[in-house]
Amino acid sequence: MKAMILAAGRGERMRPLTDTCPKPMLEAGGVPLIVRHIQKLRDEAGICDIVINTAWLPEVLHNGLGDGSRFGVSISWSDEIPGGLETAGGIKKALPLLGKDPFLVVNGDCLMTCRYDTLARPLPAGISARVFLAPNPPHHPEGDFSIVADGLLSGEKSLTFTGAAVYTPGLFSDVPEGKIRLAPYLRKWAREGLVLAEEIGGLWLDVGTPERLRQADRVLTGGIGGNSQSAEANAV
């Protein structure tokens, strides 16, 4: 399985930190967020073929990560137009680099303490995606989706989408090229019964503001992690 790390966003809420540094390159616990993803993909899921999309300050990402060899992985780059292509558009553009098999996608600007081999599992027959949800943090109380009794994704809102998911390439055949949001397509695919959903284990932090970056740093330097939620994580 290959993986894609989404790293194209501008990070407006993280300014001024992101005026000169892409948000996934910001450090928490002394390590850039995106490097932590690379390490977990390699060490926990055995994924060494990684695609990264860029739009804001692509040269910083390219210079910082290169071809991935210093991390023991192979990085392919999907450089987008200024402003980016949103999530569905970015994945659509990267499909030629991702191959014909299901692939794992993670957001470059989050912290997840779950083992990544729990994410990169095969999809059952008749299912085109598996998405991972988390309890709603205070800054997003309404949530995005829910899980129905048979484990399928529902468009009802009770949990927050972490951005982590496994997709089959064919799922994006009806997604046009260009700047395209993912959420409307996930709801469409959910109505068609094509998407499984699971609540993610461990901690999940959406590192979207300077304060939440400081919280991520405290989580990592304080040794908070493992298989249960913490008050620190739910305070984001």
Image (spheres, grey):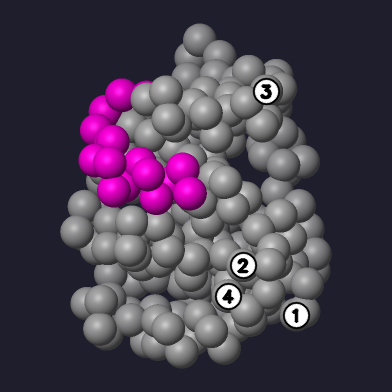
Q: Answer yes or no: do the residues labelled 4 and 1 have beta carbons within 8 Å?
A: no
Mark seen at residue 179: none
**Quadrant including the C terminus:** top right
- Mark 1: which amino acid? Ile
Q: Tell me where residue 19 appears, x and y as whole percent.
A: 68, 74
Sequence-earlier tag: 4 or 3: 4
The reply to whether discs 2 and 4 touch (Cβ–Cβ < 8 Å) is: yes
Secondary structure beneath disc 2?
A: helix
Compare marks 3 and 1 and give the one earlier in the sequence: 1
Per the image, label 1 sits on a secondary structure element best described as loop
* Residue 141, numbered circle: 3
What amino acid is labelled 3 in the image? Pro
Residue at the image point whose x is 28% and y is 69% from the top:
48
Alpha carbon separation for disc pair 4 and 1: 18 Å
Magenta range is: 214-229
**Is residue 228 found inside the magenta-colored segment of the image?**
yes
**Given this view, does label 4 or label 1 mark the residue nearer the observer?**
4
- Relative side of 200 to 15, left or right: left
**Dot 4: element:** loop
Residue 199: percent from left, percent from top:
44, 26
Label 3 residue SS? loop
Q: Name the residue under label 1.
A: 81
Give the residue pinned by disc 2.
Answer: 17
For image coordinates 77% across by 79% down, the residue present is 82
Report whether 20 appears left or right of 26: right
Q: How far apart are marks 1 and 2 (CA)?
A: 22 Å
Task: Point out the residue furthest to the top here.
Answer: 149
Task: Mark 4 vs mark 3: give the one in front.
Answer: 4
Give the x, y percent position of residue 83.
78, 72
Q: Residue 21 carries which label?
A: 4
Marks 2/4: CA distance?
Answer: 7 Å
